[in-house]
Amino acid sequence: MAEIEEELDIRYTHITDEAYLRGWLMNPELQHFLPVSNEQEVHNTLQCWLGFCRYSASLTATLNGTPCGIATLFLMPYQKVSHHCLFKIMVDPMHQKKGVGNSLLKNVIHLAKIYFKLEEIYTEVVEDNPLIHLLRKYDFYQFAEQKDYVKENDRYYARLLFGISLIRTGKKKP
């Protein structure tokens, strides 16, 4: 992993970060790893992702003040399931493999555990997503695989679900 020579900062996501997230979601290089494939789907995704800004449940990584990645906790609105949530993370392809994703993941875990008192967070990825390596580094465990979930150019890809317990530090679930 290349070191970041610029100044990396993690801050709460602002609604003005939308232009950056839109650009990443529209990037064909990243769309392979996402369920979105057109402008309307990206618009809907943006509304969902950025809606969590108002709860301080989204973090943006910046390099010299310019957004280069976002991680969002998709908080559950119902009391019975509010102890866990899905999260998503995205890093600008120009800044991948430089520690941005690592820093975002570490900070979103901390936010989930300390600020929101969540017991578990999980994410879903396409089978060949480079994020899998980072998830395993942080002791996420794979708890599900759904074959043929994504169909892209007449080829199918599995969806993998990874989770981590935030109350049983150091212990993985089976």
Image (tube, rainbow, N blue to C red):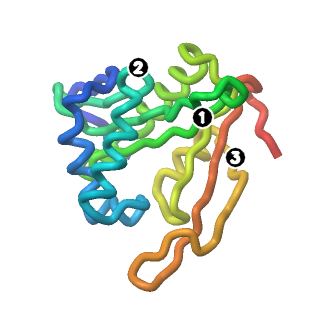
Q: Amino acid at mark 3?
A: Tyr
Nearer to us: label 1 or label 3: 1
The furthest residue to the bottom: 154
Nearer to us: label 2 or label 3: 2
Q: Amino acid at mark 2?
A: Ser
For marks 1 and 3, the one nearer the N-term is 1
**Quarter of the view holding residue 146:** bottom right
Distance between the alpha carbons at the discs numbered 2 and 3? 26 Å
Question: Measuring 33% from the left and 65% from the top, which residue is drawn there?
Answer: 37
Question: Measuring 52% from the left and 78% from the top, which residue is drawn there?
Answer: 156
Which residue corresponds to mark 3? Answer: 141
Q: Nearer the viewer, residue 83 or 115?
A: 83
Question: Measuring 61% from the left and 41% from the top, which residue is drawn there?
Answer: 122
Q: Which mark is residue 56?
A: 2
Q: Is residue 43 above or below residue 155?
A: above
| Residue 24: image location, x then y, percent | 26, 51
Which residue corresponds to mark 1? Answer: 85
For marks 2 and 3, the one nearer the N-term is 2
Q: Which mark is residue 61?
A: none
| Residue 30: image location, x then y, percent | 33, 59
Question: Measuring 54% from the left and 14% from the top, which residue is drawn there?
Answer: 115
Distance between the alpha carbons at the discs numbered 1 and 3? 15 Å
